[in-house]
Amino acid sequence: MDLLHHMLAPVREARSLRYFEQAGSANDLAVAWIREGAPAGAVVLTDTQTSGHGRLGREWFAPAGTALLFSYILYLPAELAAQSTMLGALVVAELCETLGIPGVGIKYPNDVQIGARKVCGVLPEAVALPEHMGIALGIGLNVRVNFAGTPLQNTAISLEHALGRPLNRAELLDTLTRQLDHWREHIPEGGVYRAWHSRLNMLGQTVSIDTGGERLQGIAESVRDDGALMLRLPGGEVRIVTAGDLVVARAG
Ligand code: BTN
C-alpha cells in the first residue's frame, strides 16, 4: 500500500472510506455504493484513475501521487441537487483561502481558480432514489501535478506550486470532508449558495458561453440558486443559461 493509504486514519475515524490505489473513476464507484445504500458523508478516494470523467464528456487524469481524487456521497431533495456543485467548489475555495493562497475564486459553474488558473474541478453525478437524490460529488484537486511543458501550463495550477510548500493530501481530505459535512447542512437555508456566489470571480465581466449549439456573449450578471447563469446580452435582454462552457472575454 502507498503513502496516502497510511495517512488516512483520521479520515477513517470520521466516516466510511473506500480507498483504492487505482480505480476507473471515483465517481463511478460512489454511484455504485449509493445504489448499495452508502451512508451520507461516505467517501471513495483513489490515488489515480484510469477513466476519470470531467464535465462535458472530457477526461480527467492525474498521475499517481499528485492529486486528491475523491467522490463524497450526500443525499438531497431533487430541487436542491444543483447546489451540490456549489458545495464542492465552496469547500475547496475555502480550503485555499485558509491556506493563505491569494487570488482564489470560483469560475461558473464548477472550477476553483487561483488567479485565472484552474486548481480544482467538481463533477456531481446523481442517482434518482424514491425519496431524494443520491449524489456522488466528484472532486479533482491538483495538489502537486506538474503542468510545466504541457498544454495546460497556462491554464492549470497545483496547490503546492501556488503555496510554495509541501502539503499532506490526507490532511487536506480530512479538512475538505469535514467542511462538506458542515456546509451540506446549510444547503436548505441558502447558506451554501450565498457563500458560493460571493466567491464567483466572473460576475460583471464580459463572458462568452457555449451552450451546446449556440455561442452567447454578454455580461455575467448573477447566478441563481438553481445554478442558472443570468447573462445580459448586448441588446439589453437577460438570457437564462442553464449549461455550458464559459470563457471570460474581458473585464466589463
Ligand atoms: C471538471 O471537468 O472540471 C470536473 C472534474 C471532476 C474530476 C473528479 S476526480 C474524482 C471524480 N471521479 C471522476 O471520474 N471525476 C471526478
Image (cartoon, helix red, strand yellow):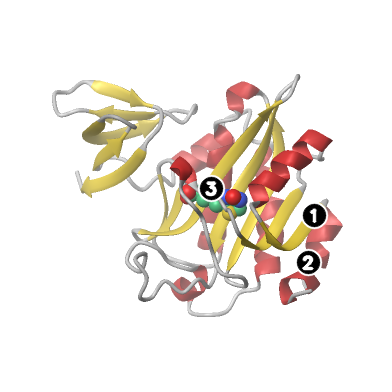
Find disc 3 in the rendering and name its residue. 122
Q: Secondary structure at mark 1?
A: strand
**Residue 152, percent from left and from top:** 37, 64
Q: Is residue 139 visible?
A: no
Relative depth, front residue between 201 and 146: 146
Cβ atoms under marks 1 and 2 closer than 8 Å: yes
For residue 195, above or below residue 20: above
Residue at 54% over, 65% down: 62
Which residue is farthest bottom? 165
Q: Secondary structure at mark 3?
A: strand
Q: Is residue 113 visible?
A: yes
How many C-alpha atoms fall within 10 Å of the one at disc 1: few (<14), some, or many (≥20)? Answer: some
How many C-alpha atoms fall within 10 Å of the one at disc 3: few (<14), some, or many (≥20)? Answer: many
Which quadrant does the N terminus fall into? Answer: bottom right
**Mark 3 or 1 closer to N-term?**
1
The label shown at residue 8 is: 2
Which quadrant does the C terminus fall into? Answer: top left
Left or right side of 39 for 197: left
Left or right side of 132 for 220: left
Cα separation between marks 3 and 2: 22 Å
**Mark 3 or 2 closer to N-term?**
2
Which residue is farthest left? 235
**Is the residue indicated by label 3 positioned so its CB lies within 8 Å of ligand 1?**
yes
Q: Secondary structure at mark 2?
A: loop
**Residue 214, percent from left and from top:** 26, 29
Cα separation between marks 1 and 2: 9 Å
Residue at 40% over, 32% down: 243
Task: Give the quadrant of residue 36.
Answer: top right
Cβ atoms under marks 3 and 1 closer than 8 Å: no
For residue 124, above or below residue 127: below
Amino acid type assigned to the residue bearing label 1 in the image: Leu
